[in-house]
Image (cartoon, rainbow, N blue to C red):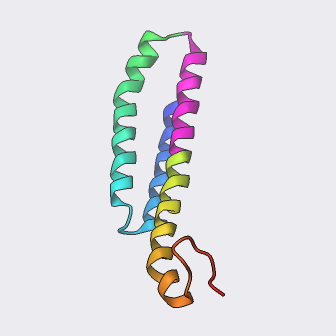
Amino acid sequence: YFKKKLLILFYFTLFNEIYIFGNYCIIGIYVIVLVYLLLITVLPCILQTFQGHLSIILILNNMFITAIICIIIYLPNKKMNKTLQVTGVDQRGQGPRGHVSP
């Protein structure tokens, strides 16, 4: 059940990364893939050692999901700031902090 859930989450986030960021966040995609590979290799060991301790597995699962959500929220903000600095400052006469100059 957990593996199926994680796989669905994995493909969903991966396609989102590619669709939204294109070439900009290839590093982010690599990081997420590496984290998933680590989790896939580590999770069976955790399941074997903590058989019956479902709460620990649930906590780990929730921590992982929140980490992914944080990554997904953080990366677009970084890219948005970059594009604002590149396009917005020159075209609209905005300051570096995004304030419209009078």
- Is residue 15 or residue 21 the one in the foreground? 21
Instruction: Report x, y in % for residue 55.
Output: 61, 17
Tell me how many marks there are. 0
- Residue depicted at 48% across the width and 11% down the height: 50
Outermost residue, front side: 102
Which quadrant of the rendered structure holds the C terminus? bottom right
- Is residue 17 or residue 6 the one in the foreground? 17
Instruction: Report x, y in % for residue 85.
Output: 47, 75
- Magenta stretch: dominant secondary structure: helix
Is residue 8 in view from this perspective?
Answer: no
Q: Which residues are magenta?
A: 52-68
Classify 41 as above or below 72.
Answer: above
Instruction: Report x, y in % for residue 95.
Output: 54, 78
Instruction: Report x, y in % for residue 78.
Output: 47, 61
**Is residue 21 covered in magenta?**
no
Classify 56 as above or below 61.
Answer: above
- Residue depicted at 45% across the width and 70% down the height: 82
Classify 42 as above or below 54.
Answer: below
Which quadrant of the rendered structure holds the N terminus? top right
